[in-house]
Image (spheres, grey):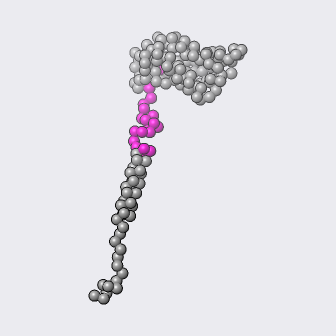
């Protein structure tokens, strides 16, 4: 019995300490899962969404040369415009309809381009605004979602 009396006694673990450690680990795990799903969750990335989208049919509108709305009227714009249709398969009947309406399409685009200044076209943001304005005008004229995007393949202003 002498051995049991001289042996160091083990202190019972503090129950509060165990509860705190478990709670902290659980909170850390919940935060880690939340961060993972926020940053890595499939379907939330706009880059992935853009990569999956198939391109629409391209319809070349043609070249435009017009004076710009700058004071003095000595500046001009030369641009080649192509429209992306909101269709993924080429439909010859719809393309033929668009070709018949090409003068109206060109007129709308020409009115928008000739109302711009060099400052409107110098930055990417400015050109994007012009593209959006063209897209809205044409979709308003020909149907809500007929055109998906506008592309300037050549653009020169002086």
Up-down relation of residue 127 to residue 106 (above or below): below
Residue 93 x %, y %: 40, 15
Q: Residue at x 37, y 57 (%)?
A: 23
Residue 68 visible in rendering: yes
Quarter of the image with the C terminus in it: top right
Residue 51 visible in rendering: no
Q: Residue at x 47, y 11 (%)?
A: 101
Up-down relation of residue 20 to residue 120 (above or below): below
Q: Residue at x 46, y 21 (%)?
A: 147
Q: Residue 49 versus residue 80: which sits nearer the camera?
A: 49
Q: Residue at x 40, y 20 (%)?
A: 91
Query: 43 left or right of 109?
Result: left
Residue 17 x %, y %: 38, 64
In the rendered image, which quarter is residue 43 located in? top left
The verdict on residue 53 being magenta is yes
Q: Which residues are magenta?
A: 38-60
Up-down relation of residue 58 to residue 24 (above or below): above
Q: Residue 16 versus residue 109: which sits nearer the camera?
A: 16
Q: Residue 116 versus residue 11: which sits nearer the camera?
A: 11
């Amino acid at each position: 019995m002498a051995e049991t009396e001289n042996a160091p006694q083990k202190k019972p673990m503090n129950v509060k300490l165990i509860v705190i450690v478990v709670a902290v680990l659980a909170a850390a795990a919940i935060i880690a899962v939340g961060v993972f799903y926020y940053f890595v969750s499939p379907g939330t990335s706009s880059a992935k969404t853009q990569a999956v989208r198939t391109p629409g049919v391209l319809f070349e509108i043609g070249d435009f040369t017009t004076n710009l709305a700058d004071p003095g009227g000595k500046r001009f714009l030369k641009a080649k415009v192509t429209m992306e249709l909101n269709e993924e398969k080429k439909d010859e009947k719809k393309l033929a309809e668009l070709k018949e309406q090409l003068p109206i399409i060109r007129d709308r685009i020409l009115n928008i381009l000739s109302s711009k200044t060099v400052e409107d076209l110098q930055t990417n943001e400015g050109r994007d605004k012009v593209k959006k304005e063209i897209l809205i005008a044409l979709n308003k004229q020909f149907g809500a979602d007929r055109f998906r995007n506008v592309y300037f393949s050549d653009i020169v202003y002086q």
